[in-house]
Image: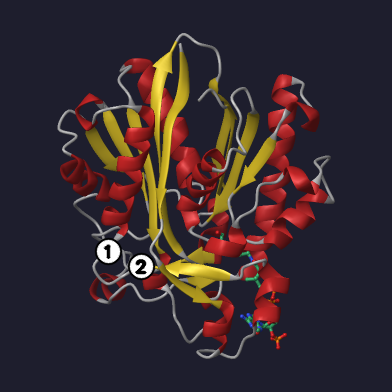
Amino acid sequence: MYTHIAGIGSAVPSRILTNDDLSKMVDTSDEWIVSHTGIRQRHIVSPEDSAATLGCEAARRALSDAGVDPEELGGIIVTSTTPDYAVYPSTACVIQGMLGAKNASAFDLSAACPGFVYGLSVAHGMMQLDPRPMLVVSTEVMSRTIDWTDRNTCCLFGDGAGAAVLKNSEEPGGLGFHIIGADGTGARALYREGGVRTEETARNAPGALHMDGRAVFNFAVRSFCELVTKSFEHYGYTEKDYAWVVPHQANTRIIDAAVKRIDVPVGKFYVNIQNFANTSSASIPIALDEMQRNGVLKRGDRIILVAFGAGLVYGGITVEWTK
Ligand code: UT7
């Protein structure tokens, strides 16, 4: 039995914040942001929306793309670093209710930016036990976690959601080799308080995210190269066997650094960070949806999804596109 991506969808808020807009808020410039990150603009959530509403919209589009009714779903996994509620209910439960997916289990999976890759891996495993379709939703309202006076982080992130519907079938293809891992010794390289770690953190509001950009950058390049190389080795393939590498959209300089270390031409990396900035776990499904809508992805294409982020965690998965 093979597990396929049968439907894909995304939803991004209509409001756009450009680098020039940002340069009126903090001491930065379009030139600095583009040359250090590749980002030109980001989408910002409206006051009425949240991770659940954006995620629900992306999910509806993915379900329609797959031709799957919400009641057919066996499970919903949501990945978000910006859930509607700090602890419970899970955003997956909120979305399950909005969709009317009354037969689906629902839970949130915490794996920061690689959440979508982790979600695909876990859903794939669950579908060996229960073959009903599953929905993976990655949805982020990063703009609500940012210190808008901190130029080191406020230019990097954006809001949006992406979703995939997975279906089992006898047809070869779909999800392939996957590798997920973590290095918890880097837990403080990227974090946001708000848990009950201490009396103080339990009582205070979560506050903004904190990041050691250099440490995350180095981890990202290292894990990026390792994930791509291991995916090649697993099948005995080279870059010629893959149509695309779709990386977590964090910084074009991470891709440039990886290209110097692995044998993949830069043109094989799909990049749309210029329009969306870093949307954490939503960045890969937003990219996949864009690729499908623009005819970039063709049936039979082999692609590799790679991601890294807070934890520190990493995840990679190969997919043979069968839509
Ligand atoms: O999803 C995973 C999440 N995170 C990441 O992937 C982030 C990975 N890291 C990065 O992408 C990069 O490390 C950054 C883009 C965050 C920073 O780039 P950098 O080249 O590592 O810059 P830096 O932190 O070493 O800072 C260099 C200088 C500093 O000024 P001084 O101290 O040398 O005077 C910063 O204050 O650049 C300054 N700077 C800025 N200047 C203008 C930092 N942010 C800005 C800014 N505009 N927005």
Indicate the position of residue 57 as horizontal and vertical percent values: 30, 49
Question: Is residue 159 at all visible to an observer of this figure?
Answer: yes
Residue 118 left/right relative to 28: left
Residue 16 left/right relative to 255: left
Res 12 → quadrant: bottom left
- Residue 49: image tag: 1
Indicate the position of residue 195 as horizontal and vertical percent values: 31, 64
Helix, strand or loop under label 1? loop
- Residue placed farthest to the top in the image? 170
Helix, strand or loop under label 2? loop
Number of residues whose C-alpha sits closer than 10 Å to that of mark 1, classed few (under 14), some (14–19) or many (20 or more)? few
- Separation (CA) of disc 2 from disc 1: 6 Å
Provide the residue designation for mark 2. Answer: 45
- Residue 267: image tag: none
Tally the marks. Answer: 2
Residue pictured at 64% horizontal, 84% vertical: 29
Q: Amino acid at mark 1?
A: Asp
Number of residues whose C-alpha sits closer than 10 Å to that of mark 2, classed few (under 14), some (14–19) or many (20 or more)? many
Q: 320 or 186: which is nearer to us?
A: 320
The picture quadrant for ligand 1 comes to bottom right
Indicate the position of residue 203 as horizontal and vertical percent values: 23, 74
Q: Work out whether 131 lies above or below 67.
A: above
In contact (CB < 8 Å): disc 2 and disc 1? yes
